[in-house]
Amino acid sequence: MLDAFDPPAYLAFDPATRHVRLDPHQPAFVQNPYEAYRWLHGASPAFFWEDFGFWCLGGFDSVNRLLRDRRFGRQNPGGIPDTRGTAKDRHHLKAFDAIEANSLLELEPPVHTRLRTLVNRAFVSRQVERLRPRVEVLANQLIDRFEPNASVDLLTAYAAPLPITIIAEMLGVPVEMGPQLLDWSHQIVAMYMHGRTREIEETANRAANAFADFLRQYVAERRRNPGDDLLSLLISAQEDGQKLSEDELISSTILLLNAGHEATVHQAGNAVRTILAQGGDPRRFFATPEATAATVEECLRFDAPLHMFTRYAYEDLEIAPGVVLRPGELVGLLLGMANHDPAAFAEPEAFRLGRVDQKNVTFGAGIHFCIGAPLARLELQVSLKTLFTRLPEMKLAEQPRFRDTYHFHGLERLQIKA
């Protein structure tokens, strides 16, 4: 194991200032960020990440606490919460900013409270557990399409179409639009990655504009002819006589579509890779409903799909000994690092079911806890169990590699052969 005096070759650390130079695009880090996380846990789980320009926390207790601390928030006191752009002039991001301005993920109380109550009421009313049979049918249909004795990319053939089909059906938009929705979503999500360019920004803005225009057509149709779908429920949801505005409805729907599949696809791929690495008969991880649920929870902890969540300080706050943030300054909460904290988990790098210390911050915590977590858990439980039950002899056709998309953490592809 690395010790406090032997950092990975690609990481430079100044113990006097606790400054770290670590290019998140460095290939060794992209393929295995946990090596750097392990060393930083021993050296300083609170550090200034120079490549991002703000302080980061990687200890489980610190991350969990700050996610719940209302003195921090997603909404920049000075305006739209995004300081990573290529220029101060944001005219080329008008459509993207319009979506962000009404997004649950980027707002704080009291607006956040009202929006989340309305969206959650509609979401919960669908009773996520009732979707289990449909997810199982869909999972089996997708596996039936695999070519016998041929390798298949599980990401494109299984992990991606399953959640986008489910969320499209829930919202009542055409399932055949799935590839286009995925394309728009990928282009929008690229805005949150390190080192974005003007081209990425302009592409994201076009995607946001097209996505919003597409949804407005369906919102207008559902207003005229409501149905038994999530979009109709979002339109009709009320709280103390208040409803979602048109812009709030569009932003909330885009968020649900993006969050309804983006992280789930990454997590499904990471989980399959992890389970195959354990060797033996993978069906043992899904022998009972309890084992299936425990397997998914350990997959969520072991190799999370989102590794950083940023928040703004709203007052002068000491986040670690000697580290004080001023109002408006960012802090990076390293979810993937927190899930591997040796102070919180026994043998954090071991994949172990039935942990007495089973917990994770993969879905966040506090008021911004992922609204789609119940659906994501259900989709992962059903899709992983169905896959390994149907294809217990499945093997990797090639060594999978992770995409250079920090702070998202997912595979480029996952070629398997049954």
Image: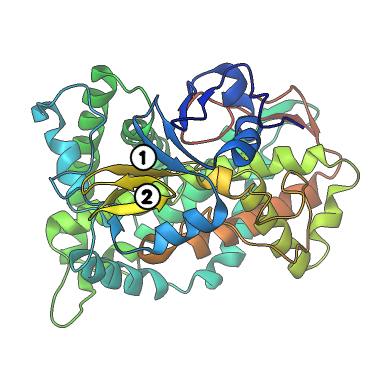
Q: Marks 1 and 2, Cα distance to the nearest angstrom?
A: 8 Å
The residue closer to the viewer here, 217 or 321, is: 321
Please tell me how crowded label 1 is: few (under 14), some (14-19), or many (20+) other residues with Cα within 10 Å.
Answer: many
Secondary structure beneath label 1:
helix
For disc 2, the marked residue is: 257
* Quarter of the image with the N terminus in it: top right
Residue at 12% across, 35% down? 94
Check whether the beta carbons of the residues at disc 1 and disc 2 lie within 8 A of each other: yes
Q: Please provide percent x and percent y for residue 328.
A: 21, 46
Q: Is residue 210 left or right of residue 44?
A: left
From the viewer's perspective, is residue 262 above or below residue 370? above
Residue type of the residue flagged with mark 1 = Leu
Residue 13: x %, y % from top left: 52, 25
Residue 340 point in image, percent of width and height: 64, 47
> Can you tell which of label 1 and label 2 is closer to the viewer?
2
- Give the camera-side residue of 250 and 72: 72
**Residue sitting at x 73%, y 57%:** 295
Residue ranking furthest to the bottom = 240
Answer with left or right where residue 40 lies relative to residue 189. Answer: right
The amino acid at mark 2 is Leu
The number of discs equals: 2
Q: Which mark is residue 408?
A: none
What kind of colouring is applied to the model shown? rainbow
Which image quadrant for residue 210? top left
Within 10 Å of disc 2 (Cα), the crowding (few <14, some 14-19, many 20+) is many
Q: Quadrant of the C terminus?
A: top right
According to the picture, the residue beneath numbered tag 1 turns out to be 181
Q: Inspect this view and state whether residue 19 appears.
A: yes
Q: Of label 1 and label 2, which has the lower sequence position?
A: 1
